[in-house]
């Protein structure tokens, strides 16, 4: 039996003990990685994420009343409340779920009461979007359980609204989209303006993806994210004076940004330049995937890191150190910081037959430099949110 199956059975057993009945539905909601296209989603640009084998599993059953009871297996806590009065919980984790219920109801859907046990293996604080996995998994589960008739895209948007409005995190659409629309051995090229998406093959017998977790999360994180968004908007405001059709940085080119450099505050110019270049990188890198040229793809990862470090300025010492460690390593085709920044993981494209040695080298160097034990996670690209059959 796979680890996933035995964990799902364990959750089902907790469900029976807590609620005295069988779960009627099991769902898996995966976390995500992003190969390229960082900080482009809220600029309407292109991203290249994938859903992975780090996931949250949900065991659910409907209730005859208006209660919802939710057990977080990993932390051993229960939340219980009524659908008629939804307000943020000081426990923290229920808010991702309550936000989904709240947004469903605000959109005119009528889910009934439910019991839920959930848990999983997404390392928290590593930037793998456990929050999107929670939101998407529950939206998907309630949609099935109560036959609400939401499309996949509606569930994605609802998950994002839950995060923006109920949890209060001003994220773009990438994480929820990846968690829902992921496909095995593929990356999703998502156009965050039109929401058109296309799959590109990402499979290799010789190379694997490994995350190296800095184990740090520097504060300033949220405020820096919001400042970056504002800086991009300032850039758009300046470019708009010349080209009114520009609504998002995605509508601008690097050449246009360069042409108006003198009118932009230095930081605004840097941010705009990075974003316009990064969108081009995603396009180019997808061609490399079609040509099966992972070496060229890996170079783009290093370029993205360079942009995030020096132009967008969302990296940190620990992330830069981990990326620098790989630069002269023949086993590594590409490496970069991943996600919002200021901590979390680097993503590494590493030769399959020497991954153990790679991990050992990285761990040793990291603990010597920072006295922190490096956690590494090999990741496999899987399908997005789906019903789990055991
Ligand atoms: C966080 C957000 C995403 C995206 C990334 C940066 O993960 O949740 O929407 O903006 O940062 O690419």
Image (cartoon, rainbow, N blue to C red):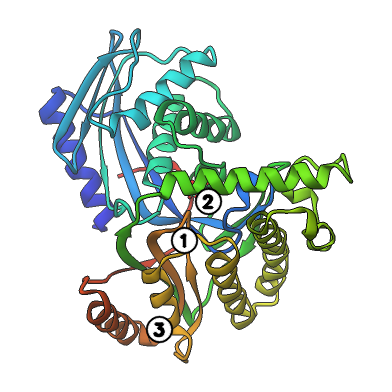
Numbered tag placed on residue 182 in the rendering: 2
In the image, is 187 to the left or to the right of 213?
A: right
Mark 2 in CB contact with mark 3 (< 8 angstroms): no
Disc with the residue nearer the chain's start (2 vs 3): 2
Where's residue 68, x and y in %? 27, 18
Q: Tell me the residue at 41%/25% (across/down).
A: 99
Q: Nearer the viewer, residue 111 or 326?
A: 326
Disc with the residue nearer the chain's start (1 vs 2): 2
In this view, 293 is above or below 387: below
In this view, 366 is above or below 99: below
Q: CA distance from mark 2 to mark 3?
A: 30 Å
In this view, 53 is above or below 244: below
Q: CA distance from mark 1 to mark 3?
A: 25 Å
Where's residue 271, x and y in %? 64, 57
Q: Is mark 3 within 8 Å of ligand 1?
A: no
Numbered tag placed on residue 325 in the rendering: 3
Quickly name the residue at label 1. Answer: 381
Mark 1 in CB contact with mark 2 (< 8 angstroms): yes
In the image, is 53 to the left or to the right of 18?
A: right
Local secondary structure at mark 2 = loop
Q: Tell me the residue at 39%/70% (across/down).
A: 317
């Amino acid at each position: 039996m796979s680890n996933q199956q035995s964990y799902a059975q364990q959750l089902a057993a907790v469900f029976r003990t807590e609620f005295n009945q069988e779960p009627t539905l099991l769902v898996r909601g995966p976390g995500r990685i992003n190969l390229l296209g960082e900080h482009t989603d809220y600029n309407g640009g292109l991203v290249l994420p994938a859903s992975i084998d780090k996931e949250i599993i949900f065991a659910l059953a409907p209730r005859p009343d208006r209660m919802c009871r939710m057990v977080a297996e990993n932390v051993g806590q229960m939340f219980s409340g009524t659908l008629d009065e939804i307000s943020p919980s000081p426990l923290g984790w229920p808010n991702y779920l309550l936000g989904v219920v709240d947004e469903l109801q605000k959109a005119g859907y009528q889910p009934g009461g439910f019991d839920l046990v959930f848990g999983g293996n997404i390392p928290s604080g590593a930037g793998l979007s456990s929050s999107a996995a929670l939101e998407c998994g529950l939206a998907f589960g309630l949609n099935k359980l109560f036959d609400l008739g939401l499309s996949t895209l509606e569930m994605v948007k609802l998950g994002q609204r839950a995060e923006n409005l109920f949890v209060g995190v001003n994220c773009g659409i990438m994480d929820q989209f990846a968690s829902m629309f992921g496909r095995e051995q593929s990356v999703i090229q998502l156009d965050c303006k039109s929401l058109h998406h296309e799959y590109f093959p990402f499979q290799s017998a010789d190379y694997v993806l490994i995350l190296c977790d800095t184990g740090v999360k520097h504060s300033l994180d949220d405020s820096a994210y919001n400042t970056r968004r504002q800086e991009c908007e300032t850039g758009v405001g300046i470019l708009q004076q010349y080209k009114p059709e520009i609504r998002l940085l995605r509508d601008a080119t690097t050449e246009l940004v360069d042409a108006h450099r003198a009118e932009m505050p230095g930081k605004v110019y840097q941010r705009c330049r990075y974003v316009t270049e990064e969108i081009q990188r995603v396009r180019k890198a997808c061609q490399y995937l079609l040509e099966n040229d992972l070496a060229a793809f890996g170079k783009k990862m290093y370029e993205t890191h360079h942009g995030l470090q020096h132009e967008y300025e969302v990296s940190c010492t620990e992330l830069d150190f981990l990326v620098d460690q790989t630069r002269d390593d023949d086993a590594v085709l590409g490496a970069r910081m991943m996600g919002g920044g200021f901590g979390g993981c680097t993503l590494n494209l590493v030769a399959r037959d020497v991954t153990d040695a790679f991990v050992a080298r990285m761990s040793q160097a990291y603990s010597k430099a920072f006295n922190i034990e490096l956690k590494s996670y090999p990741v496999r690209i899987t399908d997005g949110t789906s019903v789990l059959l055991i």
